[in-house]
Image: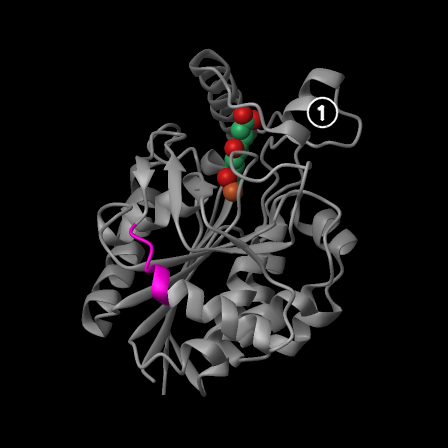
């Protein structure tokens, strides 16, 4: 089966707190390379692995991962709101295929997603409804988190199931790499915040605007050097990319949740989406990384990477 993978960092600060024009130009070139790669590959199905930031998944029930047979985006941080063009038949087939392979997969028939899903679809395809997609939520912020080996197993199982679909499948990862943006944490949260994280009350427009402003201000503070955030860690990020490039995916099984958070920040767990996507590609056969861009971008609070890979 023809298969490919693209990894793309997301940031809610893109377009709101941009770095210097030279940095922006380098990112634009890397994104253009990814778009050209995708156009040439001509996927007819995208399996999109992405996290959520307490817009769709809450502590009332927080699965480690979940596959959607229908999904709609909330429209946060300037991304579009509305339905994604989910390929429901393919989603059901991949869900059954993952379950058949021993993955205890949660399935959602009406998933709510945020910029984690919407941004890569808009950046790479020009909209959230432009390509048949199977959305797979991978928890990358809400601790406790399980071992990374289970994410690799999830990716492998979905890749094996996808190989039976007779489609041109692009596995797309959204998030990471090292970064520590101000995403709320349940442990020690004041009662009002804890209640929102558990129950998932939809924020009023004013509350959403306030939250978004807080993230933009955090980006400004971080870029100005006045912040207590765990710094972007280019060495850690490049180690991750090296393993992905060399197909050394089993290396990630020894990466612990605690060490990842300490070395690379509270949202570094979003790299689980990359590990899942590359495990899916690897399950379809040997692959080659065809382009690799990385830059630490403090203004976006992001170890920012854009990578493409294709089955040999
Ligand atoms: O209201 C809030 O606090 C929202 C915070 C939020 O959604 C931050 C998201 C950050 C990322 O997605 C990221 O940097 O990966
Ligand atoms: Fe994120």
Q: Is residue 252 above or below residue 146?
A: below
Instruction: Indicate whether residue 88 is drawn in magenta.
Output: yes
Task: Identify the secondary structure beneath mark 1.
Answer: helix
Q: Residue at x 58, y 59 (%)?
A: 272
Q: Quadrant of the N terminus?
A: bottom left
61, 13: nearer the viewer: 61
- Nearest the viewer among 200 and 247 is 200
Place residue 45 in its image quadrant.
bottom left
The answer to whether residue 218 is seen in the rendering is no
In the rendered image, residue 301, in percent from the top left (x then y), is placed at 52, 38
Q: What residue sits 31% from the left and 50% below the top?
A: 121
What residue span does the magenta drawing correspond to?
85-89
Whether residue 118 is situated above or below residue 193 in the rendered picture: below
| In the rendered image, the vertical position of residue 264 relative to residue 240, given as above or below | above
Q: Main secondary structure of the magenta part?
A: loop
- Residue 306 in percent (x, y) is at 39, 58
Is 107 a magenta residue? no
In the picture, the quarter occupied by the C terminus is bottom left
The answer to which of 94 and 306 lies nearer the viewer is 94
| Coloring scheme used | one colour
Name which quarter of the figure residue 53 lies in: top right
Q: Quadrant of residue 66?
A: bottom right
Residue furthest to the top = 206
Q: Is residue 205 left or right of residue 147?
A: left
Q: Residues within 10 Å of mark 1 (few under 14, many from 20)?
A: some
Q: Is mark 1 within 8 Å of ligand 1?
A: no
Query: Residue 112 at x, y = what percent?
Result: 46, 40
Q: Is residue 264 left or right of residue 78?
A: right
Answer left or right for 15 relative to 261: left
At a point 55% along the width and 75% down the height, the residue shown is 157
Pointer 1: what residue? Answer: 194
């Amino acid at each position: 089966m023809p298969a490919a993978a693209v990894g793309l960092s997301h940031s809610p600060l893109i377009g709101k707190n941009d770095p210097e024009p030279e940095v922006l130009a380098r990112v634009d070139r890397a994104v253009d390379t990814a778009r050209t790669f995708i156009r040439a590959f001509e996927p007819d199905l995208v399996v999109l692995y992405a996290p959520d930031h307490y817009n769709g998944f809450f502590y009332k029930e927080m699965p480690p991962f979940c596959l959607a047979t229908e999904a709609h985006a909330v429209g946060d941080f300037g991304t579009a709101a509305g339905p994604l063009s989910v390929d429901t038949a393919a989603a059901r087939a991949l869900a059954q295929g993952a379950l058949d392979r021993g993955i205890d997969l949660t399935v959602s028939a009406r998933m709510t997603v945020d910029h984690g899903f919407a941004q890569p679809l808009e950046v790479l395809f020009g909209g959230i409804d432009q390509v048949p997609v199977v959305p797979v939520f991978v928890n990358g912020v809400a601790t406790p988190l399980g071992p990374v080996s289970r994410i690799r197993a999830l990716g492998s199982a979905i890749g094996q199931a996808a190989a039976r679909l007779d489609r041109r499948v692009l596995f797309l990862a959204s998030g990471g790499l090292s970064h520590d943006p101000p995403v709320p944490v349940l442990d020690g949260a004041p009662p009002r915040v804890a209640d929102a994280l558990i129950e998932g009350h939809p924020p009023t427009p004013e509350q959403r605007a306030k939250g978004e402003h807080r993230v933009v201000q955090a980006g400004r503070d971080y870029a100005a050097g006045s912040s207590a955030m765990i710094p972007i860690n280019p060495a850690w990020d490049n180690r991750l990319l090296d393993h992905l490039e060399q197909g050394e995916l089993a290396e990630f099984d020894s990466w612990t949740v605690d060490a990842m958070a300490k070395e690379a920040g509270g949202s570094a767990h979003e790299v689980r989406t990359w590990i899942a996507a590359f495990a899916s590609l690897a399950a379809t056969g040997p692959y080659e990384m065809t382009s690799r861009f990385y830059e630490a971008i403090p203004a976006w609070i992001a170890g920012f990477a854009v990578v493409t890979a294709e089955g040999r």
